[in-house]
Amino acid sequence: MSKHMAVAAPVADELPTWSLRGRSLLPIVQGGMGIGISAHRLAGTVAGLGALGTISSVELRHHHPDLLERAGNCRDQEFLDGLNLTALDREIRMALATAGGRGAIAVNVMKAVSAHAQYVRQSCESGAHAIVMGAGLPLDLPDMTKDFPEVALIPILSDARGIGIVVKKWLRKNRLPDAIVIEHPRYAGGHLGATRAEDIADPRFDFEPVLSAVFALFRELGIERERIPLIPAGGINTHEKAKALLRQGAAAVQVGTPFAVTTEGDAHPDFKKVLAEARPDDIVTFMSVAGLPARAVLTPWLKNYLRREKSLQAHAKADPRRCVPGVKCLTVCGLRDGIAEIGQFCIDTRLAYALKGDIKKGLFFRGSESLPFGNAIRPVAELIRYLLTGSMPRLPT
């Protein structure tokens, strides 16, 4: 325990702790990243240092050889969902054990995932402290968690309008968010909070006006400013950016890609290498199969896919057999459902390749900004210390 606390101790006065359901946390939130990029080792380590660590709930069976063996070539959705729920239960329990009672463990559940309600319930039953939900408006999240009132609920949204819709809807259910993540689509990795690619750089997503507008919304609704902590996410790669956002009223900041490339990140070392060595020109935005814009590294597979995208979209057709794994992971899938305007590839397969470090076949989600430690792979403790205090570790030259 002393080892963890010694790392977490040097917190600058201007970066105070925040509270989530009575848990005092460092103002750093590790974002959820799938498939399997943020699993028990990363989330548990972050929580063990006194912050909020997040497990991505999707397809965690890829971390469990016995579950993959049981899956074999099975295409039965119910059976595969059951294996993924077993994996999720294992990962949450291992993360809690790693954290040792410190910090908090959240589970990120994408609303766009078909089994999202099952993932939410399993997360609550397995002991997660919080559910984080994005990729769609989580209007019914309070209903899904009504049997678990002690679990914190954290929606991911991107603008004041979306926040207003969710908060007002939840108020009618006598529930308020325990915190809100505000994701900026211009900078974040993976699936983005804008519905159209051309909206990604819209000023309405900039943190300063969003924070101001949300505080005004709280006043209008009679909600105390401190009642719902706000957590900006996307492009926060320096201590100075974190400090500036907290001075603007944020309670904490969420960081994704810099955590993905840490020593304790759950992905293959080659996954971390792809993200860490990517140059600005290597990072592209495109339309995902889920119907949302997404950001990733332009690896050989993605380069080839984008070259063929128009042709694939022209031949789109609804056919359930196009779901190669059979898991039917998404509520809406451009490939399976024949939606020509969005992506035409199997996201489950491509993200699984990336988790294993397959540079030729994988889809490597990444945020747009440079990494705090360049291409160096460093421990989680050093990243948290830097974000909190500005103290840079000695890096190899």
Image (tube, rainbow, N blue to C red):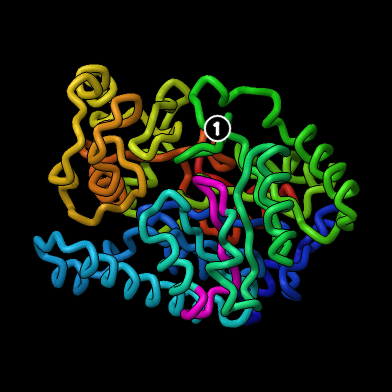
- Residue 236 rendering spot, x and y as whole percentages: 65, 40
Q: How many marks?
A: 1
Q: Is residue 65 left or right of residue 213?
A: left
Q: Is residue 48 visible?
A: no
**Dividing the picture into quarters, in which one does residue 30 lie?**
bottom right
- Residue 155 rendering spot, x and y as whole percentages: 61, 54
Q: Amino acid at mark 1?
A: Ala
Secondary structure, mark 1, is loop
Q: Is residue 145 above or below residue 58?
A: below
Judging depth in this view, the residue of 256 and 328 nearest the camera is: 328
Residue 126 within the magenta-colored segment of the rendering: yes
Q: Is residue 332 left or right of residue 359?
A: right
Q: Residue at x 59, y 54 (%)?
A: 139
What residue is disc 1 on?
A: 194
What is the crowding at mark 1: few (fewer than 14 residues within 10 Å), some, or many (at least 20)?
A: many
Q: Residue at x 78, y 42 (%)?
A: 245
Q: Residue at x 31, y 41 (%)?
A: 333
- Residue 43 rendering spot, x and y as whole percentages: 51, 65
Q: Is residue 76 visible?
A: yes
The residue segment tinted magenta is 124-138
Residue 269 within the magenta-colored segment of the rendering: no
- Residue 40 rendering spot, x and y as whole percentages: 44, 69
Q: Is residue 91 left or right of residue 31?
A: left
Q: Is residue 102 above or below residue 392?
A: below
Outermost residue toward the front? 172
Q: Is residue 395 left or right of residue 38?
A: right
The N terminus lies in quadrant? bottom right
Q: Residue at x 75, y 75 (%)?
A: 22
